[in-house]
Every structure is written in structure tokens, then in C-alpha cells.
Amino acid sequence: MEYIILVISLVGIVLGADFLVAGAVSIARKFKVSDFVIGAAIVGIGTSMPELVVSFIGALKGNADVAIGNVVGSNIFNVLAILGVTALFFPIAINKENMKFEIPLCIGVSVVLMLFAFNFFNGNSASISRIDGALLLIMFISFMWYSFRRDKQNSATPTATTEETPEEKTPLWLATIKVVGGLAVLITSCDFFVDNAVQIAKSFGVSDAIISLTLIACGTSLPELAASVAAAIKKNTQLALGNIIGSNIFNITLILGVSSQVMPLTSAGITYVDYIVMIAATILTLLFGFKGKIGKLGGAFMFISFILYSIYLIN
């Protein structure tokens, strides 16, 4: 039965991602919002919901390692595995705005998280205090405000009109249903997929440690993977990039910001190596982006880096 549910869940993940991306693109066109911003805002926040649920519940149960570890692990998986795999098949376009603002910001909030976690600023016993969390939430609000403000200014610049695609002709109400419905199907399918994958792994005698490091951390990033691949297939690689960079920024600023308000977060099980890999992963995106895109070579390097990091964790 677990195998049947696993297959059905995979189908749901694919269909949910397809509807989510199609609806998001239609909304972007209706309101003249860029693919990147719609990917970062609507798709990015939506696909970060599993991380939010896992981290929030971890904080409620007093297991802060789950809250912080889930975010750090998911951010590493998002960049090295998802962007890496996507770039192997579809070159990921990176524009000057991404290079100047979003990617450096993602690196910045990652560094801030590491400094908070190791008490660089306050020296308190709690790694991420409620004050730290409030600062992270302010960063989240500021990022959202600036992104939409800048996008609105850019949309005021006249652009050449092109023939509308079927997605662009979709009525707003239908596009909204696609986004909400696709997101609901995507997250629900991911939840079933992870639960049944864990059951199957346990039946083969796989340890809880390996399950938590692989299936749980990577499982909460399945929405990002599905949405990014679906966007890339539709040749919306800016939406795919926005989904990943946006999700990583939200994971740190919004999810840990909210979770730390429940109770201060500690992360004894998360080492310097994990934080450095998370930061280095985004730096790789910046380095490969100087050519205007992440191609097959960059994608392969990123994915191999993820494999090596996974081997390090298991050993």
C-alpha cells in the first residue's frame, strides 16, 4: 500500500507544481510583475510552507535542532541539488538585479543566521533569541517591500508587446485557483510522499539518523524541486531562480523569525561546517552567475558538491 501511495503522491507533486507555476505566471502577467518576483513571493513562500510547519512544530516541542537544522539543510538542498539538477537540463538565467541584490542578500541573511546561532552579537545562552527573531522578521518585511517597489518601478518602463501565450490569457480567477489549488495538492502530496518514504525506509532497516538527514530535510524541499523543474520546462528559469533564492531568504527570515517567537532556538547539533556549506552554496550561485546563467558545468559542480556533503553527513 505504501508503494501505491508513493506513486500517487509523485503524480500529485508533478501536477500540483504544474498548476502552481502556470497560475503564478498568469498572475505575474496580469499585474506586470516579473517572473523572478512572482517566483520569490508567491511560489517561494508557498513552497516554503513545509519548512515552516516542520520548524514551527519543532519549536513548539522544544526541539530547536529540528527547526534550525531543517532550514539549514533545506537551504543547502535548494541551491546545490535543485538548482544544480535544474541547470543540468535548463540553463538558469541570472540578470544584473539578481547579482546586485537578491543573491547577495541571500548570502547576507545566511551569514547573519550563523552569527546569531553562535552568539556573535549577544553572547546569551540561546542561539536565536526573540530579539534576533524579530530582526529576522524585519528583514523579511523589508525584502518583500523592496522587491515589489523595485518591480513596480521597472514595470513603468515601456516594453515591446509580444503575442500573449495561453497562460497569459487565463482569467485572474482561474489563475488564482490554479495557484491555491496547485499549492494545496503539492504540499499535501509531499507530506504523503515523505511519510510513506520514511515507512518504506524503516522497513528496510534504515536508521532514524539517516532518514532525518535525507528524507525529512530533502522531503520538505520537494515543493521547491517540483516548482523549479516545472518552471524551467516552461522556460521560466527566472521564476525557478526566484523560487529557490526567495525560499532560502524566507526560510531564514520568516520561518526562523516566527519559530523563535515561540521559544528561543538553540542549535547544538548544527556545526560550523553546515552553516559554511549553506553560505558557500549561494556564493557558488553568485560566481557562476557572472556569465549571466548557470549552465550544465555549473549545475554538475553544484550537484556533485551536494553529493559530497551528503556523504560527509552520513559518515
Image: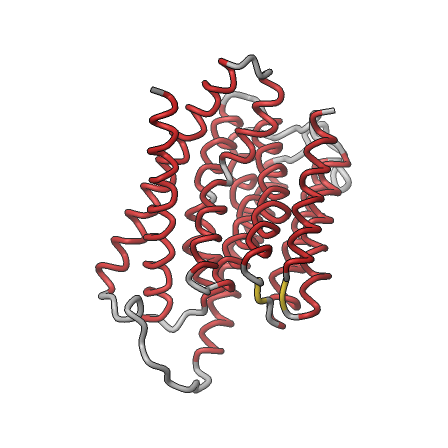
Q: Nearer the viewer, residue 8 or 121?
A: 8
Q: Quadrant of the C terminus?
A: top right
Disc tally is 0
Going 56% across and 33% down the picture, which residue do you hit? Answer: 217
Q: How is the image coloured?
A: secondary structure
Q: Nearer the viewer, residue 73 or 226?
A: 226
Q: Quadrant of the N terminus?
A: top left
Q: Nearer the viewer, residue 141 or 268?
A: 268
| In the displayed structure image, the side of residue 244 where residue 182 appears, left or right | left
Going 58% across and 53% down the picture, which residue do you hit? Answer: 139
**Percent from the top left, x then y, of residue 19?**
32, 53
Above or below residue 297? Residue 97 is below
**Percent from the top left, x then y, of residue 190?**
41, 35
**Percent from the top left, x then y, of residue 297?**
69, 58
Above or below residue 194? Residue 147 is below
Going 35% across and 70% down the picture, which residue do you hit? Answer: 29
Whether residue 280 is visible here, answered yes or no, is: yes
The image quadrant of residue 35 is bottom left
**Percent from the top left, x then y, of residue 181?**
28, 47
